[in-house]
Image: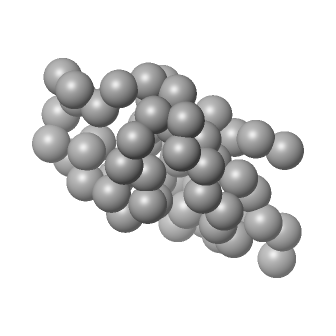
Amino acid sequence: MATIKVKQIKSRIGAPKDQKRTLDALGLTKINKVVEHEATPSVMGMINKVKHLVVVVE
């Protein structure tokens, strides 16, 4: 399975509680933090949920 890097680009302040939980599940706690995950359907769904707060770095 391929790995992808996810970077948080916007603040979580003002985001709904479920989106904050999704960022925590992805391991993103601060702006500009980059984490690496396997490109599974569940991870891709989490990224899609908070796509306005994160960017996928190739």
Can residue 6 be seen in the rendering of this structure? Answer: yes
Pinpoint residue 39: horizontal percent, then vertical percent.
71, 65
Establish if 3 lies above or below 31: below
Establish if 21 lies above or below 39: above
Pinpoint residue 48: horizontal percent, then vertical percent.
52, 41
Which image quadrant for residue 41?
bottom right
Q: How many marks?
A: 0
Which image quadrant for residue 2?
bottom right
Q: Observer-nearest residue: 4 or 35?
A: 35
- Residue at 74 percent across and 57 percent down: it is 4
Q: Is residue 28 left or right of residue 9?
A: left
Pinpoint residue 34: horizontal percent, then vertical percent.
61, 49
- Residue at 84 percent across and 44 percent down: it is 58
Q: Is residue 1 left or right of residue 24?
A: right
Q: Looking at the rendering, in which quadrant would you find the N terminus?
A: bottom right
Q: Observer-nearest residue: 26 or 48?
A: 26
Pinpoint residue 19: horizontal percent, then vertical percent.
28, 42
- Residue at 22 percent across and 26 percent down: it is 13
The coloring applied to the image is one colour
Q: Observer-nearest residue: 31 or 39?
A: 31
**Residue furthest to the bottom:** 1
Q: Is residue 28 left or right of residue 6?
A: left
- Residue at 43 percent across and 60 percent down: it is 27
Can residue 51 be seen in the rendering of this structure? Answer: no
